[in-house]
Image (cartoon, coloured by chain):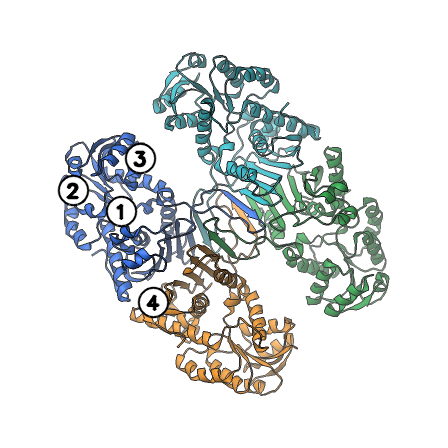
Chain colours: A cyan, B blue, C green, D orange
Amino acid sequence: MTLRFGLIGTGRIGQVHAANIARSDEATLAWVADPFVDGARQVADRFGGTVTADPEELLGSGGIDAVLVASPTPTHVDLISRSIELGLPVLCEKPIDLDIARVDALRDAVRSSGVPVALGFNRRFDPGFAGVRARVAAGQIGPLEQLTIISRDPAAPPAAYIAVSGGIFRDMTIHDFDMARFFLPDIVEVSATGTAVFDDGAREHGDFDSAVVTLRAESGAIATIINSRHSAVGYDQRLEAFGSAGMLSVANAPTSLVSLSTAEAVEAKPPYQDFFLERYAQAYVDELHEFVKLVRGEPSRSPSFEDGRAALVLADAAQRSASERRTVRVSPAD
Amino acid sequence: MTLRFGLIGTGRIGQVHAANIARSDEATLAWVADPFVDGARQVADRFGGTVTADPEELLGSGGIDAVLVASPTPTHVDLISRSIELGLPVLCEKPIDLDIARVDALRDAVRSSGVPVALGFNRRFDPGFAGVRARVAAGQIGPLEQLTIISRDPAAPPAAYIAVSGGIFRDMTIHDFDMARFFLPDIVEVSATGTAVFDDGAREHGDFDSAVVTLRAESGAIATIINSRHSAVGYDQRLEAFGSAGMLSVANAPTSLVSLSTAEAVEAKPPYQDFFLERYAQAYVDELHEFVKLVRGEPSRSPSFEDGRAALVLADAAQRSASERRTVRVSPAD
Amino acid sequence: MTLRFGLIGTGRIGQVHAANIARSDEATLAWVADPFVDGARQVADRFGGTVTADPEELLGSGGIDAVLVASPTPTHVDLISRSIELGLPVLCEKPIDLDIARVDALRDAVRSSGVPVALGFNRRFDPGFAGVRARVAAGQIGPLEQLTIISRDPAAPPAAYIAVSGGIFRDMTIHDFDMARFFLPDIVEVSATGTAVFDDGAREHGDFDSAVVTLRAESGAIATIINSRHSAVGYDQRLEAFGSAGMLSVANAPTSLVSLSTAEAVEAKPPYQDFFLERYAQAYVDELHEFVKLVRGEPSRSPSFEDGRAALVLADAAQRSASERRTVRVSPAD
Amino acid sequence: MTLRFGLIGTGRIGQVHAANIARSDEATLAWVADPFVDGARQVADRFGGTVTADPEELLGSGGIDAVLVASPTPTHVDLISRSIELGLPVLCEKPIDLDIARVDALRDAVRSSGVPVALGFNRRFDPGFAGVRARVAAGQIGPLEQLTIISRDPAAPPAAYIAVSGGIFRDMTIHDFDMARFFLPDIVEVSATGTAVFDDGAREHGDFDSAVVTLRAESGAIATIINSRHSAVGYDQRLEAFGSAGMLSVANAPTSLVSLSTAEAVEAKPPYQDFFLERYAQAYVDELHEFVKLVRGEPSRSPSFEDGRAALVLADAAQRSASERRTVRVSPAD
């Protein structure tokens, strides 16, 4: 039986989900909602579904089995809240909200509802990162001692975006906090350093364009996150798990098998993929598949509401650490 | 307007084409023929189309705009012949036939018909090989002097297959002959060395399991093809274009971005892709797209019937060279 | 004219210097001092020089033009002090001392003496690191925004060594602090996280076996140092300079050009070099050569006494940061 | 006891040997002969030895234990002949001679003399090639089925050199023939293709600037040699041993650990080493060491006079194959 999806939000990431739902044998696109109704219409024309400008109409339609929330962040809490009231499982894009208080206010309702709520931490489904985690778990490199995550976007967003982004830690590093927790769930301390070295937009809004975060796990293992809002060479997404018996590394994804060698330089390859839609194309497919399994009550790798909250706890701690210039203790699971 | 395809043959490669036709915005699967009618039915169930056991019914149905021939080699000449009589464009899997005499008998009819006939040399559409050729043409490495093609299948086919394969040069190297011609169309001499070092099936049928072929172009450039019927590390498909100003290389396709480093070995990656269906997945998509353009009368990169014939001329010459132990002169275009 | 060297200390690193002095066209080994006089004798037998158990005899001999101090750390301050009194240029192994107070007590004397004093930060002379710095300075990657230094020793030292080492920051990270200053001389803040995850010796002495240090430069650029006292894959010495226009990376040094591909793994290489004597062999040669130039009054790349002091200031700050869990402000040049 | 060497010939390669002899603990440079006596004098000034313009004076001096022949090829046969008459072991640069008849005339004398005669096939001592051979012998990739040798010089020699070189096969490929025999001693067939695509000097003298040679071993294994007289990217020296269970590859030697990534290209490295003096520096050292062991009667990896002859037999066969356009049978050991 295929799952009938209601998609809320038809921006860049909503379109990716729409295409994946349409292509999946397990899902169909039943409803598409976006206040910008032309966007909803274009998506429905390509991938199917009834169109509405009003998410409430979609939720109350009775024609959907699950909700995919890809609308702007400030709408997430309400849409999750409403969905679980209606007993509709939700796959919600990250972050849950920029305000931990609002997340916490929703927390009990999610817990007690028993309705599946999954967070869109797509990178967990990347075959590279997931593969390394599985191999670490299998003991291939012994106990994990250090984790290094290099994560740089190709280009800084516009200043207008930065103004409402919640800052680099809540907006961008949030993915890396989740990745760190994917390997080391028991983070107890956060130290962050942020600077604005190239982006006037970040500087004006008191935000950072570059940051380094150090996370200490209960076990003593240390995770390091290195971020930049831009990268001339393309989307820079690397990870290295260092254990007592070896290392597992995830390299950047090549865009070609071709290399050029001349009298000036040898083995030169073309720049890396442009951004997350290309780099994590397969991850989005697998994310959807795991969410379908979650809804069906099967074992699933979907990150939970709690995972979404824990990443935000780390982001808040990093923000505080960077501004107060001290290490911040956390207990994300509490 | 979408092109209605009639697919003849629903084995491994026929299924790939069926899936690509079904996924394409430019094409639909209208008819599916296979004497093994269950195979046809399964394909039609997944990808659409009317089923028949008889290719003739498909060709005469009036419901198709183009034919995709993916049936066994001995049927190719008749099916091409019949298609062009009916004015139906054909995309035919390689080789045209194992017997150059039969190919030549068809040659004038193809020429005079004016009906588009394309050969399924899928590797020409691989982004790596096509990219290198474009960059050579753009002068990035100066005049091409040497071309090295390493092409090794993961595992030798069964002896029964080898018995009817026409030998390694006509069956396997044929792709590499076309690749050599893709870069150096004007081949004038062929020298081939073949041995059977590991495969009893090849030895019993007087065939080779390993071969090296040297091709000299009119320009003086030399192409070297290195073949093996097996490869423990996976499908080994590499190419290097060497020019007076540099080299362009196509590496094997990694199956993962992950590498493992331990006290025994560092930077170890998982084995290469298993075989051509994975390695050339994108190439098959592009091959179909280019054929659609050919049928529409647009500029197209589709290899022609003449390309199919020329590769066979080189294969025949290699066979003769290897058995008579001498260089064989050729003029594939005559 | 060749420089007559007096070598004090004939342990592992003293022997390297002795060999390099002997091989150099610019230097000869004139005197060798070590309280363990058998060690001095063995070095002199191979590389020349008059032997003594007493450094004072060497310094006062009148037969040397420069002093190379490779004796234990606690002797450095006195030996530098005595050398400059005698007007003898000194190349002293790092660190100057573990106690910044003792270093500061020597500081004015060094300054006012006008005698060249160079510190043995050998990594500055590594062709890889030096090359990246020169290319950064030449603007190849635009303004430097992030510097990542991964530095892991192959195996933890014995607990007895750790007890007197001054701790990981003063003993091991000191090299990386200097490397960070090599690229970003104007460090203003230090944040450090240390843990003892595998080494009981470190734990017992309140030391760390793993550490991550974040350094902020006046310019806003951030340097990250990732350390471990052990590495199963061999000596792990990497650096990445990230600028607005690109990246320059220094990979680990391969010990062989050979890679092995099998059905289990492809392109596997042998582990990295064992330790610093191999990895930095050329750097030690160049270090000596630059010191000879310094003594001759020629332009030289030798790191100064002030560089040695500044690295210790950063090490002290890291120690404080890690224990007090806060960012520490520094002004190493004051 | 150190071996007293007489060096004949003080050109580029003679100077390398002189330096290695001088640096070795096992050898000293006792005599240096060159008709261009200034060259001999310069070498002796740096590395020791009595100077003479006359090799005969060196050979008859009574002051040497072994002869190193680094003079022009036409002098090799006479110098070997004279050395063995005097009972002096010889390490002679390749080739023995360009004329197999002259080599054969010397063959019995060498055999019956019992005096050690070693050929300067330096590449056998390269740690990469020697390592691969040892690992093949240890069974790491199963039975060897294909060997691929890519060997390209950085730049073509002057036309005057080509005129007396004996042709590309005897002058340049000779090293690769020996390398093929190093792995597959039992070569039975030779097929060669040569062209002159870029070098007028080669064309004028009826020589080739590019060549591909296929060698078939008794076992059925095939070796392929790909040669060019020039290479824009630097000295191109690669080898791949392909067996039933895997591959062992020797990559080009990087000249730096640094790679550059920009918006145009990523992971670009500097060009390869310029030529053999750099690429095979360690091999020349090991070659000398193995020859010393040979002279001492210890087990040695030195290639023999017979190895030198066998490579020439293959070169002659390749020359014939390329001009007569046929496969040539050989029995190099007869």
Residue shown at 42% from the left, 74% from the top:
D310
Q: If you read the primary sequence from the N terminus, does the residue marked by circle 3 or circle 2 appear first?
A: 3
Residue C266, how many percent across, how many down? 48, 50
Do callouts 1 and 4 mark residues in contact (Cβ within 8 Å)?
Answer: no
- Element under label 2? helix
Q: Earlier in the sequence, mark 1 or mark 2?
A: 2
Which mark's residue is nearer the viewer, 2 or 4? 4
The amino acid beneath tag 1 is Pro
**Same chain for the residues at labels 1 and 3, yes or no?**
yes
Amino acid type, residue under disc 3 in the picture? Ala
How packed is label 2: few (under 14 Cα within 10 Å), some, or many (20 or more)? Answer: many
Give me the residue at 31% from left, 68% from top. Answer: D327
On residue B19, which mark appears?
3
Q: Is residue C295 visible?
A: yes
Rounded to the nearest whole Å, what is the CA distance between mark 1 and mark 3? Answer: 21 Å
The chain ID associated with circle 3 is B
Which marked residue is nearer to the observer: mark 1 or mark 4?
A: 4
- Which mark is drawn over residue B303? 1
Q: Amino acid at mark 4?
A: Ser
Chain bearing tag 4 is: D
Q: Which residue is labeled 2 in the image?
A: B84
Marked residue chain, label 1: B
Q: Are marks 3 and 2 on the same chain?
A: yes
Chain that bears disc 2: B
Q: Which residue carries the number 4 mark?
A: D191
Task: Categorize mark 3 by other alpha carbons within 10 Å: few (<14), some (14-19), many (20+).
Answer: some
